[in-house]
Amino acid sequence: MSTTIPIPATPTFAPKARRMTLKRRRQFAGVVFALPAIALVVCFIGVPIGQAVYYSFTQWNGLTSTWIGPSTWTQAFHNTNLWTALRNNGLLLLSVPFALAIPLGIAVLLHQRVAGWRVFRSIYFLPTAISWVVLGLVAERFFAYQGTLNSIIHALGFSHISTNMLGYQSEALIALGITFVFTMIGTNTMLFLTGLATLDPSLEEAARIDGAGRWRIFRSITLPHLSRFIQLAFVMTVIALFSALFSLIFVMTGGGPGYATTTMEFLIYETGFNQGDFGTAALYGLILFVITGIVGVVQLRLIGSNE
Amino acid sequence: MTTLVTPPTESEGTGEPRAMKKPRKVGRWILFGAMVIVAIVMLYPFWVMVITSLKSESQFLSGGGFSWLSWSSLTSVIPVGQEVLSSTILCSASIFIILCVGLPAGFAFSKLRFRSSTAVFLVIVSAMMVPLQAILMPEFVNVTKLHLTGGYTGAILVYAALGTPFSVFLFTTYFRGVPDELIEAGIVDGLGYFGAMWRLVLPIAVPAIATVTVLQFIQIWDDLLVGLLFIQNTSDRPITVGLAVLAAGRTTSIPGLMAGSIISALPAMLVYLGFQRYLVKGLTMGIDR
Amino acid sequence: MAEITFDGVTKIFGDDIRAVDDLSLHVADGEFMVLVGPSGCGKTTALRMLAGLEDITSGTLSIGGSVVNNVLPKDRDVAMVFQNYALYPHMTVAQNMGFALKVRGLSKAEVAKKVGEAAAILRLTDYLDRRPKALSGGQRQRVAMGRAIVRSPQAFLMDEPLSNLDAQLRVEMRLEIARIQRLLGVATVYVTHDQIEAMTMGDRVAVMRGGKLQQCDTPQDLYDHPRNEFVAGFMGSPPMNLLRGSLESNDSGLALVLGSQRLAVPSNYATSHQLPKVDGPGVVFGVRPEDIEVLEHSGSDSLSTKVERREALGAEILVHLALVDAVGNDAFVVNDSGAVVSRPTTLVAKMGPRSGVSVGDQLQVRLNPDHFHFFDTDSGLSLRRSS
């Protein structure tokens, strides 16, 4: 037996493998080396996607599933919670321009290379290392009735005004959005700073010789150069918005008050684990998958266009 | 003779911009001020954590005072030691798998290309875009049915699977920059493909390994969802889960929570400060050239 | 040490790209064989097949008498020097050189001894602990050589090893490599696109073009008797002048008609060459730039020309000469644009640095009748009869 079967992945190939051409041997090694990664991704990401499609048509509590058919989908779309979550995600999208513009400003500031800019850079990026769980805890302190926000308002002389943003349906989402912008600052600043570093300084000098002012240079040279980085930051920010807010919401509001801060990803968790409705949660997951898929295609094209 | 004269004029040239800078000195101070303000905003979380943790619960409610109480009684509020240990185990095991699986795959996709390897590569890379929430329910049920939620195994495998697409992408991109001849030289020198990977590819890939490790460490250390759902025993919880669950309960002492937060934030911050450049490299991989 | 034989070796990439087409070549034991040709001629592919880095589509390749078509590179016992050196960046010079020996399981002491010997030959002894990054281009090149020679392999394979060096270093290393190869007596296949390297280094030179072997000979034979127009044009700098003309027979014997001028062709060419019929389809006439000299008077063995351009190279002057007719106008010489090798209508002559020619001068030039070359207009093959 052992003489007829070439033994894979051993450093010295069995004598019988001599028949294989060099190219085959290389390809064989390639398949063997790629296989573990393929297996892991297929088992833990690929298969669940297929299962999600199946279970989205069933009544499923995690143990037993009964086939219902496409009516699960019409049912889901009549669920107001889904529309609330989608609306919340939509409203949160309004924070994306801030999550891009503020880091862009900070990156340009850092790029001026004033004394100590390296230290400042490290400070600005530092919150990036911290868990959004922790940042959520801090944000809760900031927005709380006895928190920093009210202290600032009072210090500014408006002692009659007191806010409790996380406690009100109308304001909690705004607080979440502000926290989200803060958490994205480090990453996006890092991206833009890298982009600025790849800008050829002689371009700027040439423009200055041509008589362009600072603003003109920024508009006509810096911004177009950064466009790839801005696109990438945009995509990363939107994906984070749809798939990374869980920690913040879990710690800050638990999705409430009511469903005021329940986004798609939190709705999936809530539906599956609090209501035990696994089938509907799987269906919601697919909707999220489609949304991020669309954004992801844009991202892949950005990466692809670079090669 | 003329060539001998040039160097001094060049050094005069470098002095020139310094002279030009002078009129902008005021502008520089304004810039500096703006940067200080941004720094204050970015340091705010740390300030809150430190100040709050240095108060007793009653001092926190009344607003003033200073106390070591939340630190001295920290372990009774949060099992910090156990949770940090859990986080460490989760991180190291997942990253180990991510590296063991990603490095050979990157080598294969860049240097040992096989039939339709490009298509397979693209499929794996697109898995980067799949958020865990999208496949959360089937994933949870699968892992539970396989009885992997008892210890760390389920969470480790999920983390490994989620981190693998990025690591494959990064290693492949990295190895594309390594000349083919280097591997060929090794093969002519007497190595097989496995030997080439072990003795040439691995040592050359050290910067890429560092990048993957740092990024995944921060990702996994800071994560909540996987640890929350895929680890059944409360005694095996990582620190982020411990903090989040306590916070969501809303009965815990805030100073204690903040002290725990500092403990949770420290390792990731240290890793970040030590390996900042690898982090930047990983984030901008594929676009900064 | 061993001989190398390519027997009808063909390499097809994809469906129909013939990188190497029916290559048959024998490299004797200890011989220095240079494969030369323009980029894309298949010389590197041939070398890579020999190294075992590329599959052989058809034909057989043997080293030391045994067929190696499907033998793994590590079992072929050949050493290769790459164009970009491919030094392992994470190893020191000594580790780089000793790596292949270590892989083959030699003891540390043996490895150190062999590396030491090779380093002495290459004058690298002082650099053994450095990393490749800390070396100059020439030193890296030596390490790449060292990595090959420590193994005392059956054959050395070198893929344009000098092309990344500056001109001066290249001349130096040319001699160095030739010296080491003679010292070790290992069969060597050396790939280059530089005909000077080919001429100076090779025991024999194989000229390739479009995947096909054009000619394989000693450098001098290649230069003196190119088998076709391509080899004639490729070897030598500047290349051989190739003009299209026709043959004519008159009272004084054979003559070559170039435009309106006639050039006497010594009668021995009629026997040594298979010349086309008089007044036939014509012939491609070749003469090397150094075989053109200026005369004071006109004669049957000279051409009247006008200087179009001169390039002073210091040690010599290249003079571009246009043929003129009896009235002094530029003569019309057939220029076939469809030819595989461009056949210019001017002659380039190499002249001494003191020759006072200037643009516009009318010159009588004598072409050395001992070194005429004749090629078939269609096939480009030399018309010389093989002796």
Image (spheres, grey):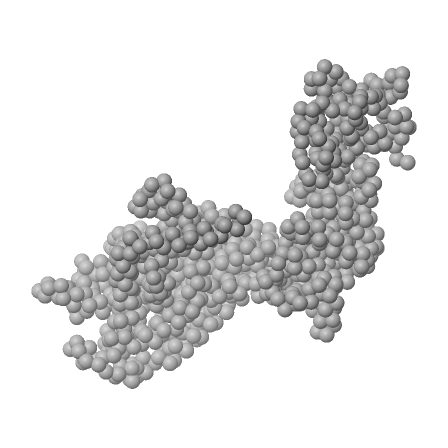
Observer-nearest of B24 and C70: B24
Residue C127 visible to an observer of this rendering: yes
| In-image side of B95 versus C44 (left or right) | left
On the image, the x and y values in percent for residue B270 come to: 39, 71
Reply above or below: C189 against C346.
below
Reply above or below: B111 against C9.
below
Reply above or below: B116 against B253.
above
Marker count (numbered)? 0
On the image, the x and y values in percent for residue C317 come to: 70, 35
Residue drawn at x 63%, y 54% is C84
Residue drawn at x 22%, y 69% is A141
| In-image side of C40 versus C62 (left or right) | left
Residue drawn at x 75%, y 53% is C175
Q: Quadrant of residue B134?
A: bottom left
On the image, the x and y values in percent for residue C177 come to: 74, 55
Observer-nearest of B82 and B41: B41
Q: Quadrant of residue C89?
A: bottom right
| In-image side of C237 versus A93 (left or right) | right
Observer-nearest of C297 and C47: C297
Residue C76 visible to an observer of this rendering: no
Q: Residue farthest to the left? A: A160
| In-image side of A101 versus B186 (left or right) | left
Q: Quadrant of residue A153?
A: bottom left
On the image, the x and y values in percent for residue C262 come to: 80, 20
Observer-nearest of C124 and C226: C124
Q: Residue farthest to the top? A: C327
Residue drawn at x 41%, y 78% is B85
